[in-house]
Amino acid sequence: MIPRHQTVLFIFLLAASIIMGVLLWNQLRRAHDRLLRGEDSAPTQAPQVAPAEQATLMVANDADNTVQPRILSLPLPQNPEARGRAILGKLLDLYAAPDAAHPVPGGASSIEQLFLVPIADSKGTAAPDGSELAVVNLTGAFVAGHPSGLETESLTVLSICSTLNANLPHVTEVRFLVDGEPRATLAGHADLTRTYLTSEDAVAAGGGL
Amino acid sequence: MAALIAIPASGPIFAQAPAAAPRFVVVLDAAHGGDDAGARLGSEAEKAYTLALSIRLRSLLMARGFGVVTTRESDTALEPGSRAQIANHANAQACISLHATESGSGVHLFVSSLAPVQNAHFDARFLPWKTAQAAWIMRSLSFAGVVNSALSHATVHVTLGRTALPAIDSMSCPAVAVEVAPEQSTDAQGPASLDDPDYQARVVDALAAALVEWRSQAREDREQ
């Protein structure tokens, strides 16, 4: 024999479950309708074309082991990370061209990601001058296809670092990843485990390449 | 018995018997080796080219009275740290890392891109392993100048640069990386082959001449 109070409790819980189920179903239908209405009424905006801006590419040349500035007019996004990635993509497009003075296959798609991280001291306080570390994530295909050699690898690293510094002056340090992982060298020579300094003072002092 | 006298394949090769007087020791590091073939140079791998270059230069230097330590004498794999370890144990007065490539032309001469250590922080007994070369940058730049002069005198086109090469960065000696590329051609036929015996001989002779000059400068500095 089930006690009376347990029967009442069971009926109460059953009723509560049914009411909650109905409310949930109702909410689900409303959300679904709202989503459909939103999709229908969403205006189809034409993609905004960013205004063309001047960007300085530090272009490498294997013949004389130099990196020379070349100013181009490019449509660039406002977000610094997207901007840096677009500029580096253009730089690598130049290297992938058939008549490149520093031939490296791959092109713009070789820059998988670019992250900008504020440089902090040992206490975790950001540097007062706002200097940033750029983390360049290259694709494995780019590294696999990069010609092996001290000069060619050093020029690739140098041109990426100095191009970032020329267009994003707050970037004073650069680190490299390949497919999101640290890699010992670019193609057997240039060290990818160290942090490269890009500021002019550092380069003048021998800290950069 | 053979096992007792066998020399480890990956160990340093001391090509000069120890002498009573302190010798002017040069370390020759033939880049790559073993599984690490380096760049592809036509039908040859960079590791074989650098080894042949190292052996040839070693012979020339020994004939001129140098103590020569090579990081490898056969096709063996060596980590960058092991190369630096061999160089640092040799207490060398000059270290040359030998490379080869088909890109560019002439000889590419590199010094470590580490920032020079300020004198106030210099302590030769305790150097950070990964940046040991920082204490030797100024000497390495002087050494690169001597090598540049010798190569230019031998009509070899030279390009100078700084690079981040782990083996060099850990060396505590005046160190340069020499990358041999095909000779710059004056006619329209493009760069010559790396295999040209005359070109190879000129490069090796120029490197030997540079080391003779570097030894003379070191002796003059010591006497002053």
Image (cartoon, rainbow, N blue to C red):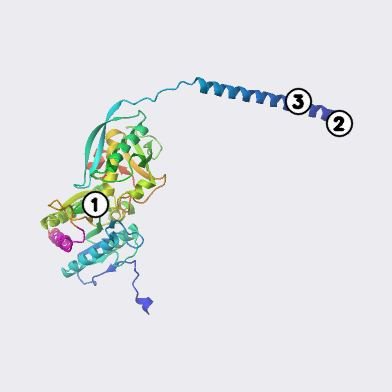
Nearer mark to the viewer, of 1 and 2: 1
The quarter of the rendered structure image containing the N terminus of chain B is bottom left
- Mark 2 falls on what kind of element? loop
Q: Mark 3 lies on which chain?
A: A
The amino acid type found where label 2 is placed reads Pro
Q: Nearer the viewer, residue B65 or B53?
A: B53
Q: Nearer the viewer, residue B7 or A119?
A: B7
1 and 3 marks on the same chain? no
On residue B103, the disc is 1
Q: Nearer the viewer, residue B26 or B223?
A: B26
Nearer mark to the viewer, of 3 and 2: 3
Please report the bounds of the magenta region as a residue range. Answer: B193-218
Whole-percent x, y for residue B200 in the image: 18, 62
User: Which residue is drawn at the image coordinates 29% and 43% (left, top)?
Assistant: A96
3 and 2 marks on the same chain? yes
Q: Name the residue under label 3.
A: A15
Q: Where is B159 relative to A134, above or below?
A: below
Q: Is residue B157 magenta?
A: no
Whole-percent x, y for residue B152 in the image: 12, 54
